[in-house]
Amino acid sequence: MWVAVISPDSVYDLQGATTTGAWITANQYAGSDKLFTGEVGKLYGVRFLQSRNAYVKNEDSTYQSAITASGEIHCTLITGADYFGVTTFQNLETFWKDLGSAGTADPTNKLASAAWKCTFGARVLNSNFAVSLYHSIGRNSE
């Protein structure tokens, strides 16, 4: 199964494309597949995850032919298995500083702090296992 990260406006367009009838909403297959956070449906073997953080470009001459009235180009990233890898948290350390431990920086002993640090990494493993689709949307996003 492929996975795509898509903007809400792009989801609206896919759900409205009724000519093929291939769009399946996530609640129709929720019992048979474990849903990802933000998953809204699937189409032609691609599971779509809606995110307000999906990449949207403002007017750009490179994609001039696809610019809509809103002046936006939406990017949908479609990834396959093993496109990227993520490590687990390693060497997790927590730090606690009690009230008054800041010395003269906290003369009335009102400040305490807590923090953590760890080693973590994410990396693209094989860029051939993904594709970025640049497209316009069918309606104004406002």
Image (tube, grey):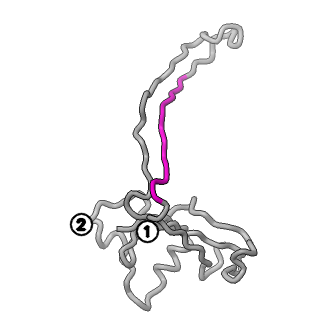
The amino acid type of the residue labelled 2 equals Ser
Q: Quadrant of residue 2?
A: bottom left
The residue positioned 69% from the left and 83% from the top of the image is 65
Disc 1 and disc 2: Cα gap in Å? Answer: 16 Å
In this rendered view, identify the residue nearer to me: 66 or 17: 66
Q: Which residue is mark 2?
A: 32
Q: Dot 2, crowdedness within 10 Å: few (<14), some or many (≥20)?
A: few
Q: Position of residue 139 (x, y in %)?
A: 62, 81
Look at the numbered disc 2 and give the secondary structure of its residue.
Answer: loop
For residue 118, above or below residue 124: above
Where, quadrant-wise, is the C terminus in this rendering? Answer: bottom right
Q: Quadrant of residue 97?
A: top right
Q: Position of residue 29 (x, y in %)?
A: 29, 70
The residue positioned 46% from the left and 79% from the top of the image is 15
Q: Which residue is mark 1?
A: 48
Q: Position of residue 115 (x, y in %)?
A: 53, 26
The amino acid type of the residue labelled 1 equals Phe
Q: Give the mark, 1 or 2, whose residue is nearer the N terminus.
A: 2
